[in-house]
Image (cartoon, rainbow, N blue to C red):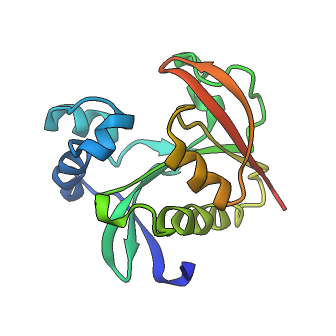
Amino acid sequence: MATDRITFAPLTEADLPLLHDWLGREHVSRWWGPQRSLEEVVRDYHPAQRCFGGPMFFFIRLDEEPLGFIQRYAPIEHHHEGWWLEIDDSGVRGVDVFLARESHLDHGLGSAAVTAFVDWLFEDPLVSEVIADPAPDNLRAIHCFRNAGFIARQVVKTPDGPALLMRYRRP
């Protein structure tokens, strides 16, 4: 999959109903949690939330068509919530991703999207590393991140339960 066909658009308020629909799909909710109300999605994914001043949430587009969702975060900005207390490097970014349609799974689209997003993150010279934290039994996500160049390090405890810490260091 050529990553030049993949783009990212910051999430807007108008996108929230579609995101709500996607989060309710079985292949997504299995890993992202049970269906939330639209009000909860608006609260949790409102475009005004920022990561070091920039947009945090993005729609992934393939040839301008919505393909999925990706978010970036800085672990140190979430210490107060109990996340990533062992990471104190302000240059580390984390990513979470899903594809909206089950029919798009297992075709390399997720890995291509993650690769393009990581490349974009590394355009910022202050970004030192990108992490991902799929559930240890989410083999599809682990495969996606491995194909994008991430290396599995260890299972860690998070507020959501165990996660496989995967890292992609700046080349």
Q: For this view, does 15 lie left or right of residue 155?
A: left
Quadrant (top left/top right/bottom left/bottom right) for the N terminus: bottom right
Who is closer to the viewer here, 37 or 35? 35
Q: For this view, does 96 lie left or right of residue 37?
A: right
Who is closer to the viewer here, 47 or 35? 35
Q: Is residue 75 above or below residue 92?
A: above
Q: For this view, does 149 lie left or right of residue 73?
A: right
Q: Is residue 6 above or below residue 168?
A: below
Where in the figure is residue 91, as x and y percent of width and height?
74, 44
**Residue found farthest to the right:** 171
Q: Is residue 105 above or below residue 5?
A: above
- Residue 155: quadrant of the picture: top right
Residue at 32% in and 44% down:
28
Where in the figure is residue 78, as x and y percent of width and height?
56, 27
Where in the figure is residue 153, as x and y percent of width and height?
77, 35
Q: For this view, does 30 lie left or right of residue 72?
A: left
Where in the figure is residue 162, as x and y percent of width and height?
57, 21
Q: Is residue 40 above or below residue 58?
A: above
Who is closer to the viewer here, 142 or 35? 142
Residue at 57% in and 55% down:
144
Residue at 58% in and 22% down:
83
Quadrant (top left/top right/bottom left/bottom right) for the C terminus: bottom right
> How many marks can you see?
0
Residue at 17% in and 49% down:
21
